[in-house]
Amino acid sequence: MTSPFSLNGRTAFVTGANAGLGQAISVALARAGAEVVCAARRDCDETLAQIAASGGRGRFRHLDLTDPMAAAGLFDGAGIDILVNNAGMIRRADSLDFTEGDWDAVMDVNLKAVFFTCQAFARAVLARGGTGRIVNIASLLSFQGGIRVPSYTASKHGVAGLTRLLANEWAGRGINVNAIAPGYIETANTQALRTDPDRSAAILARIPAGRWGRPEDIAGTAVYLCSDAASYVHGAVLNVDGGWLAR
């Protein structure tokens, strides 16, 4: 009997797959049986090596989402069943000093590119009469304000709202759209916080699990949302945060 969590026979497309959350998600999807297209601005050799070592299948696709329209037409005829919008960026500065350039750079990658990549994927899925899964990577700052990251906070609030809107439009057409809101995870985006003793201690003091999250902590949730086990889950933003939001 096939497991409801199996992704055998499906092809997944993961953005920002070269490191961090994208890498962990790509490897987990491959272990669940999907062929994974690892998309990023930089090479994904390390991710592909991990996929191969686990007995999975993967391939690289260069994709630079600093151009928010970079995915236009990319999915046409490609047979992609799963899209994980993981690529993102962050810029830190006091709001009084934040520049227009930093605002636009973050919003272009974190929100505008997410919408138009979802659109390109959905057009291709519906054109072939198929079904699909979209998982967007949101944030705790989809629910909270944060400090010194105005465009990141705005973009991640936008991702949560966009996830719900697209679910409303596409749930009845065979496309599940959901999001994961990671807590404080050990990635490049949190390096500055983890190396600041005071900030790191304050963050850890609030996390009931008592530790920073690891990219692998997010991967299982992604597999679930991409699988048949989540077939009736639409428009959810699932926080995976060690209990942070429960405090």
Image (cartoon, grey):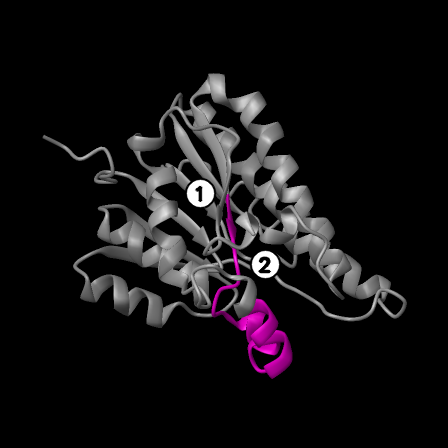
The percent coordinates of residue 148 (x first, y second) are 76, 66
Instruction: Indicate the amino acid at tag 1.
Output: Leu
Give amino acid for label 2: Gly
User: Which residue appears at 52% of the width and 65% of the height?
Assistant: 41
Q: Secondary structure at mark 1?
A: strand
- Image side of residue 42 versus residue 223, left or right: right
Q: Does 201 appear in magenta?
A: yes
Question: Where does residue 149 sit, x and y in percent of width and height?
Answer: 73, 63
Foreground residue among 95 and 241: 241
| 86 is higher (above) or lower (below) than 236 | below
User: In the orientation shown, which residue stands out farthest toward the left?
Assistant: 1
Where does the magenta region start and end? 180-203
Quadrant location, the N terminus: top left
Q: Label 1: few (<14), some or many (≥20) within 10 Å?
A: many
Residue, disc 1: 83
Q: Is residue 88 magenta?
A: no
Residue in view at x 23 percent, y 47 percent: 32
The residue shown at (58%, 22%) is: 169
| Label 2 element class | loop
> Based on the displayed image, in which of its 4 quarters is residue 153 positioned?
bottom right
Q: Is residue 114 above or below residue 65?
A: above
Q: Which residue is mark 2?
A: 88
Is 196 situated left or right of 31 in this image?
A: right
Q: Depth check: 33 or 236 in front?
A: 236
- Kindly tell me whether residue 196 is visible in this rendering: no
Report crowding for label 2: few under 14, some 14 to 19, many 20 or more residues within 10 A (C-alpha): many
- First reached walking from the N terminus: tag 2 or tag 1: 1
Tell me if 35 is positioned left or right of 140 in this view: left
Is residue 171 depicted above or below 93 in this figure?
A: above
Q: Residue at x 78, y 65 (%)?
A: 102
Residue 104, image x and y in percent? 77, 57
